[in-house]
Amino acid sequence: MLSRTAQIRLVSSHPEVYDPCDDSFALVDALLADRANLVEHCPSICMEVGCGSGYVITSLALMLGKDSSGCHFFATDINAHAVGVTRKTMEAHGCHAELVTTDIASGLETRLAGSVDVMVVNPPYVPTPEYEVGQFGIASAWAGGENGRSVIDKILPVADKLLSDKGWLYLVTLTANNPSEICLQMRKKGYASRIVLQRSTEEENLHIIKFWRDLDTQLEFLDCHSGVMAIGVVTSVFKGKRVAQKHG
Amino acid sequence: MRLLTHNMLSSNIKGVTNGFPLLIEVEKVVEKQVDFNEDFLRNMFAKIEWKALVEASRTMGYTELPENSESSMLNSDEFLRKFHHALLELHLEEGALVCPETGRKFPVNKGIPNMLLHEDEV
Ligand SMILES: C[S@@+](CC[C@H](N)C(=O)[O-])C[C@H]1O[C@@H](n2cnc3c(N)ncnc32)[C@H](O)[C@@H]1O
């Protein structure tokens, strides 16, 4: 049987690039567990922000495999070495991604807005002093600033902009990142969420959260924050969804 | 870098208002065959800036794309094949992307565009 995840022996490496680790495996396991839904979701564009070695995006490409041959993959990393390693890892598995060295999705945000059907992110989430964030090289792989939230909090609005109406986001977080607060923040943007995998390793307590745009969440938020004024908006949101579904 | 990527990139320099499309400076182009998938092309058609794709493919040495396009053309197999070739099979392996407004060059090495900005550009 064809392997549904990237094979470690085919994953390239570089001294300045984050090797697949417990967090990477947890994310891929969460995606695998959701694989049937992902296939049914029929994404046209999947994207990884912070692709590192390429282990996750390659695994996603392999697990969607022949079932979604019409799907294309984008991947970015702020570390140019990482993007180079991802290219090699993808090629070693016979896959291809559109690769860009950039900060989160800078340069892609305008044209890819509303087009990403599946986004996966294993961000730098370790609480560190703020000045360690965004350093070049390997430190940028984990340094997350205060509560490990510096980069995560920059990624969330970008994800909101890039995700399509049916878009899903899978995000790796740590207890120290305050996952429930992250869910609340996303709820205000109209996303429902679920922790799809929780795993404790020797050092970390990992939560993989899945987010999706949800009509009820949008209604609830409009309801309690804009009162009567919201009714018109709600109707149009609802109509928009119906139309989107018909076309989809 | 495929022209699909090029079509999705704009100049991200602070203050730039007309950052699309980026101009292409070609050093090396490679062609790689990709499985033909009509569904993807149909899905993407609405999202592609056609003029930018035509210009970009010309710069890369491919001149077969029609100047203008409309969705009815998606019924033509010949059109789809050309669209497929331009969008997915032409790769800019070495060269640069140039901001149309400022002339700032973003290098493309080993097929990967680098859109990282200097501190004074963010
Ligand atoms: C924890 S590692 C994950 C790597 C890989 N996705 C994996 O799961 O094995 C985080 C990655 O995010 C990248 N990164 C950090 N800050 C970033 C930013 N602002 N924009 C894009 N990538 C970033 C790092 O360079 C690193 O490769």
Image: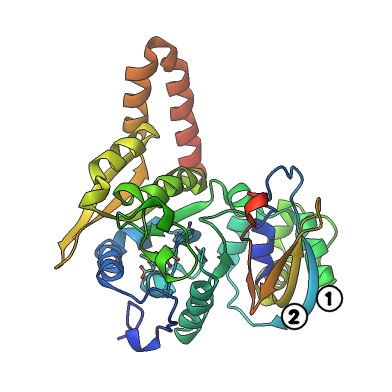
Check whether the beta carbons of the residues at disc 1 and disc 2 lie within 8 A of each other.
yes
Q: Is residue A18 above or below residue B66?
A: below
Location of ligand 1 given as a quarter of the image: bottom left
Residue with the most extreme bottom position: A9
- Colour pattern of the rendering: rainbow
Q: Foreground: B14 or A119?
A: B14
> Which type of secondary structure does the marked residue at label 1 adopt?
loop
> Which type of secondary structure does the marked residue at label 2 adopt?
strand
The residue at the point 54 percent across, 55 percent down is: A105
In the rendered structure, find residue B61 and report the number of the disc placed on it: 1
Residue A246: give x, y in percent of width and height.
48, 41
The residue at the point 76 percent across, 55 percent down is: B21
Q: Name the residue beneath numbered marker 2.
A: B29
Q: Is residue A159 left or right of residue A212?
A: right
Q: Reading the chain from its start, which is encountered first: label 1 or label 2?
A: 2
Identify residue type, mark 1.
Gly
Category of crowding for the residue at label 2, using alpha-carbon neighbours closer than 10 angstroms: few (below 14), some (14–19), many (at least 20): some
The residue at the point 57 percent across, 68 percent down is: A98
In the rendered structure, find residue A238 and report the number of the disc placed on it: none
Residue A160: give x, y in percent of width and height.
46, 43
Q: Quadrant of the N terminus of chain B?
A: bottom right
**Between marks 1 and 2, how big is the CA–CA gap?**
9 Å
